[in-house]
Every structure is written in structure tokens, then in C-alpha cells.
Image (tube, helix red, strand yellow):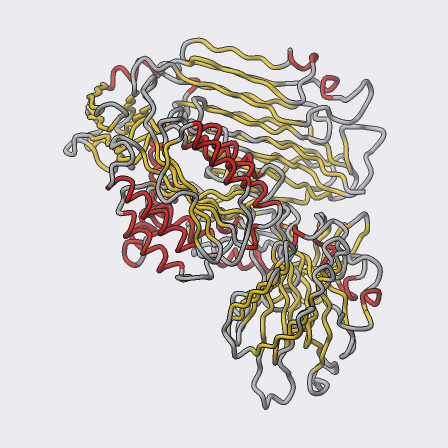
Amino acid sequence: MESHLLLCVLLLIPAFASSDFLVTHVRNVKKRNSDNDLVVNGIEIYRMKIDSKVTSRFAHNVITSRAANRGNAHKEVFFDVELPKTAFITNFSMTIDGITYPGNIKEKEAAKQQYEKAVSKGQTAGLVKASGRKTEKFTVSVNIAAGSKVTFELTYEELLKRQFGKYEMFIKVKPKQLVKDFEIEVNIFEPQGISELEAEGTFITNDLQNVIKKTFSHGKGHISFKPSLDQQRTCENCSQSLLDGDFIVKYDVKRTTPDNLQIVNGYFVHFFAPTNLPKLPKNVVFIIDISGSMSGREIQQTREALLKILDDIREDDHFNFILFGSDVHTWKETLIKATPENLDEARKFVRGIDTEGLTNLYGGMMKGIDMLKAAHEGNLVPKRSASIIIMLTDGQPNVGISNTQDIQTHVKKAIEGKYTLYNLGFGYGVDYNFLEKMALENKGLARRIYPDSDSALQLQGFYDEVSNPMLMDMELNYPENEIADVTKNSFKHFYDGSEIVVAGRLRDINQNSLTVDVKGEGANDALSFTSHQDKEQTAKAFQEQEYIFGDFIERLWAYLTIEQLLEKRISATGEEKENLTAEALDLSLKYKFVTPLTSMVVTKPEDDENQAAIADKPTEAQAAPVVAQASPVHYVYASSPTWYTSVDGDPHFIISVPQKQDAICFNINENPGAVLRLINDPVTGITVNGELIGDKKVNNDAKIQNTYFGKLGIANKHLNLKVTVTPEKITIQNETGKTTFTWLDSVTFQQESLTLIINKKKSLVLSMGSGASFVIVLHQVWKKHPLHKDFLGLYTLESHKLSEQTHGLLGQFFHPIDFAILEMHPGSDPKKPDATMIFKNKELIVTRGWQKDYRRDPEHGLDIPCWFVHNNGAGLIDGVHTDYVVSSLF
């Protein structure tokens, strides 16, 4: 039985973007020691503290965990932390028996050798991996001797962003064990003064309510949560922990003026958040993807979100809906005022939105931009109004202009900097890099909408963030002869409840004062005022030194500068990108931040198997599950309802488990002519079977005959539809007869509930009704090749649209899975260590290796690191592999 000892702490600032971390200290599969409910598998976690200091919105967080090996043999201790995607790790160390092993931050290239060594040991994606919507996981483990103690300490920093009028720290507490000395402590210092401070928890009982200690006065706030062992128990004498849920801290600052300027040691930070301004009218064009891939839950949740949004649109706003599938449709020909009558009509339209066709993203975007242009040129909208485009898609463009670089160029040219573009990517099938670049080039941002039961709330939540513009065309100007290296100081919109932050360096470190001119356009007139601050005023405010850490304004400036340089780098090219990279890298190394350009090398004791490991910072695009390409490779994503599966090569299957940022793989060895049941869903009626072919002869070197899929049969019995795919042709059979295509064709074929797109001599995309879609990759070899034949690879997209009853060699893994890896040790190949995998309470011997994914590169493929399960997936798949052999393709 697997037992996870887990503390999850998420510091979330603001309500959507945040400061979150999760601490899992020990992972093992042994039973709890009944004699001592503080010791699990010989390991006791006797101290756990989360210490957060927040000074002028800049958070400095230190997580400390102390463990002791109470057993009589070496034990492996894990330290897992989930921290916010917007945070930068600044330090890590572990101390074993008085000896400290620090983490060193280096340029990524400089750490390449250690990284490759870590990869060969199974540390494939580094120690920091995307693990959730808002978090990244930092993991390190170490073997400690009997009687030894280890202390882990991780530090990270983050600028707290304001949303909906508050800064919020969202702390998810989930130790899953009793901890003798458990404590969360938050100290906040805001020189403007704290106006409100709240703390609450979903798991807080009446008894625990008194354990939360909260005080604030003037600029200082303090919150602590330190439950005793008895207070942690679910019942008297129980060993289970009651600490399981969300612990939330919210606060805001006093605002007697629209802004606040602070100067410390030659650096300044300027906070701008005016209140009580009239709201600007807004003009919103919703551009919605209604292609076939949005069918089912996605389009239903989109309708739900749009109906909620319509309830929040103000009467002085203008809006319209544009829908794009294969064609582009509009609700009205122009923007419409949000009168009660028009809103009622809009609700009827939204309720009737349904899916059709492919993805003409370019056509939808250009229609929306043209509509905004026409509204402004025709004076249909107020001159003082904010114009916003919100585009939602779940796929990639494949009708009209489909080259993403061309779409970016056309959209940027058409918008001309006049409107803000927000791109929402639904699920993992989107090209997130493309959406992000296009949004950033047009003064907006991209956001991933995670396919889950709350997707409608995610959509509505994003709209709430941008629904109340107060000012537009904001500029904060500072004397050029006095300041240098200023961060972004012009903003298209300022939204109610948010905050603009600008930081910079003074040319003269001894300068005593600074003046700023603020300009912007409001709902009724222009905004213009001058603000002034001198160093003595700041010094007086910062007399409470115990609440302040180091040169926090300088570090805040460095954090904000790096963040903005990395953002600019996304859409930059050529020499500009090289310069941005160099500048961001220099600052990352100087201030010791783990960013996408740096790595932390964690050195372990010499007798530990993995002597060095690497911590990297992933991007949002990397956080998304990667769609596999050709090799009987099976990708399944267990952390969200959207999973990708594939089978390719000589059948290699890969199961991707995104919450672990890892994968499991296995082969199926059967004779040529065998037909394997890959997917069977009795609810939707979809089945997929594959027939194996062999090489032209036995490989004398390997003494075996490799097999591949030479024929695939995809059927939907509810639609009376069968599709047969071979390396020569594609045959569609239904009640009306047969239609045949060859791989030399490059066509888009639609017939009732079937859509087929053939990419000449490369791949095809097939969708049936509201079920999953399939990508089939063609592998062609030299016709006179003495050994190999042409073969096929199958990739399943949107497998969440299949029912929970789905089974088959691939289908059984559409459901969430979990596993644990223990006792990693050298295998027969020095580069491929063996380990014990715990899966469904079974212990499997697995080997670290790689399998090929060919979907994006059919010629060369992409190496996917995975844990290989031997003997035809024995112990991993239900039953034995021969249970999946069927008599025919249909």
C-alpha cells in the first residue's frame, strides 16, 4: 500500500496567479508503524515550517523540513515542493549530519554536463516540473543512514500581484501525517498601512479556529498557524491528520493617494492603483472556436460561461459574437449596445451555439478585428472606451491561412496597437507558444483553460479580471536624466482592483528624491498628475527592520525586469532575441534566480546514486502535455480530462502521466497477422483495432522478426461507419457505399458526422461525431529496403470524450493512473537504471529508457524518456496481452 507523507502549501497572490507550494516529504509503500504514529517506514518528520516575509508586495518564502531516520537501515527521504509558476527559486540546501550540500545556480549550458548525467540516471526533465494549473514541482531525494537526520531548506521569491482589490495567499495544507512541530508563519509589512487582513481555512473546525493567530496594526500584519499534535488528529488517539484543505490569507493596503513611491539604496518602486474612478465603457468581441473538436463538454461549458458573462455586461458596453469552424459566422453584423433587449437576444443565440467543421482561426480573427475597426470608424462606440478581443480555441488552425507565423503577422498589422487581444487556449491541443506570441504582440496575454469540471468558471473568471477597465493608454514618466533601467512604464489598460508596478535604478545612488508624471485617459476626461517622494520619507516608513529582508526593492526590480525580458523574448527574433536573452541571463545569475535560462545544480553526498541533479524552470508551453508522434507510443494524461494516446513503431506504447511529468512505456510482441484491440468504448460505439505486419525477413542480428501496424480499423457502430487505413489507401464505408483515397491525395472530406483531413504522404486526422479524434502517421521506407515495410502509427486526441467504460490496450489508460518509483539502482545498461515501480499495489521491475514519438517529426522522431515495463506490459495492463487479440479488424 503506497503511503504519501505530504504537505501542500500554496501561497496564491492574487486570486488567480499566485504563490503556491506543496511539500511532500516522504514517499514509501510500507505500512504505518503502529507503535509510533509519527514514524512512517522508519522516517519521522519532526519539524515543518513555512516562513513568509512580505515587504511592499515582494514575498520572500523559506520552506524548512527536518526528518530523522528512526530505522536500522538506510532510507530514502523525498522533499517535494510545489511553488507558483510566477516564482523564482533563489536558494536550496540540504544538511545531513551537520554537512551542508548547497544548490548552485548556473547558466543552463554550463550545467549541461550535469544535466545529461542526471538524465542518464532518470532525472529526465530536471527537478522543477510543471505540476498543475498554477504550480511547478521541485523534488529532491537523498539516502540517509540509520540514526541520521536531514534538513531541507528551499527559498523562493515572488512579486505579489493584486486582483479584485486584494492580495491573496492561498495555502493548501495536506500533510497526510502528524507532524510534531508544524507551523505556518506570515509576516507582512506595507509602509502604506494595512487596511484589512483575513485568514480562514476550509478544514478549520471550531477548535482549530482559535489556533489561527492574526494581528495587524498600521503597516505590520502577522498570521501564524501552529496546531499541536492533538489538534491535528481527526479524532482522539487517531493517527490521521485533520489538516487537509485550503488556508487562505487576504490583505490590502491603505490608499490615501492614487500611488505610492518608495526609494531604497539607489532603487525605486512605484505602485499605482487609483480608486473611485468611473468605469470605462468597453467594446468586446468574443471570437469562439466551434470546430468539431469543441463538441461535447467544451462547447457546453463555453455556452455556460458566455451566459454568465452576459449577466455581467453593463448597459454602456458594446459586444458581439464571432464563431469560427470551417466557416465564419457572426451574431450581428456590427457591435451591439448591451441593452436588456439585446442581451436577451444574445442569450438565445448563445444557447444555440453548436460545433461544426474544422478550424478557420484566421478568418475568425480578421472578422473580429474588422468589426472593431468599423465600429470606431463609424462612431458606433464611445470615443472614450476600451476595445478588447477575447479569442477562445482548443485546436490549431487548419482552414484558410493555417501557418501560425503568417497569422501572427496579419493580426498584428490589422490591430495596429489599437486593441488588446486575449487568447484563451482550451486544453492541451493548442499551440500555446503561438497563442502567447500573438497576444503579447497585441498588448494582451494568453491563458490556458484547463479541461475540467470547472472550465466554465475559469472562462468566467478570466473575463472578470478584464471586465472593468478604468483607464487606458497609461504612461508613467520619470526624469530620464535621473533614472536608468526602468521596467515597463506604459500600459494599454488599467483594470479595477488591479495595480500597476514600475521599478527602476537611480543613476545617482545618493539621490534623495524622485518625481513622476502620470497620464492616462479616463471615462470622462484625461488623467494627469505629478507624484513626488524623497528618500527620508521611505526611510522613516521602513524603520521596522525585522520585517524587511535585504535589498528587497533592488531584488523586486531584478525580478520584475527578468520577468518582462522573458516575456519580450517570446515574440522577439534574431538579434533582438539574443540581446534580451543575454540581459535576462546576466540578471538571473547576478541575483541567483532559477529562470528558464538558468539551472540549479543540486550536489548530493558522494555515496548517493545520483550525485548531481538539475532544477530547471519550465514555461507554460512546456507545462502542457506533449502530443506523441509515431512509435507504438501511448500517451495518456492522467492529471486532466484531456489525454493523448498513441501507438506506433514496433509496437511501443507510452503512457504519459503529467502530474508526475513522467511516462510509462511497454511493448507488445505478437506474430504478424495478429489483430489487437486498442480501443473499445461501448457507450460511444467507437472501436479501434490494429493488424500487425512483420519485416520482410527475420533480422539475423537480433534473431527476431519485428512487427508493426500495417492496417488500422476505426469504427463507430452507432453511425454504421467503418474506416480502414493501410500504408497504401484510406477506405470509408457507410450506408451510402465506399469512398477511397490514397496517401497521394491532400484533401479535406466531410460527410455527416465524419471529418477526414489528409496531409499528403504524411498523416491524416479523423473525427467521428462527438467522440475522440485520431491522427494516423504514415511511415514510408525505401521500396527496395531489404528488411522493413511501410507501417502506421496511431495517435488519439481528446480521449476524454470517450466514456469511462473505454478499455483496450490503449483505452484502459484513458482513466487517471498513478505510480511511485522506489529503490533505483544500476541496471545491465549503465545508462538505463532499474527501479521498483508501485502500480495498483503491485511491485514491478522497470528500466529507465526512451521511446520514439514521431507525430511532429515522422522522419526522426522525438525521444520520450519513460519507465519501461517488461514482458508485454505484465502487471501494468489488465490481464495478459493475449486477452487483447481479436479475430478481425472489425
Check the picture and name the quadrant holding the N terminus.
top right
The C terminus: image quadrant: bottom right
| Residue in view at x 47 percent, y 44 percent | 424
Q: Is residue 762 visible?
A: yes
Q: Nearer the viewer, residue 33 or 29?
A: 29
* 816, 408: nearer the viewer: 408
Q: Which image quadrant for residue 783?
A: bottom right
Q: Is residue 516 left or right of residue 465?
A: left
Residue 370 x/y as whole percent: 31, 48
Q: Say which quarter of the image contains residue 340.
A: top left
Q: Quadrant of residue 878?
A: bottom right
Q: Position of residue 669 (x, y in %)?
A: 76, 72
Give the vertical position of 377 relative to 504 (above or below).
below
At horizontal 69% and vertical 16% (from top left) the residue drawn is 205
Against 330, residue 481 (above or below) is above
Total marks placed: 0
Q: Is residue 134 above or below residue 211?
A: below
Q: Is residue 791 above or below residue 435?
A: below
* Along the line of sight, the residue nearer the viewer: 360 or 226: 360
**x, y percent for residue 527:** 22, 24
Query: Which residue is depicted at the point 19% across and 21% down?
Result: 530
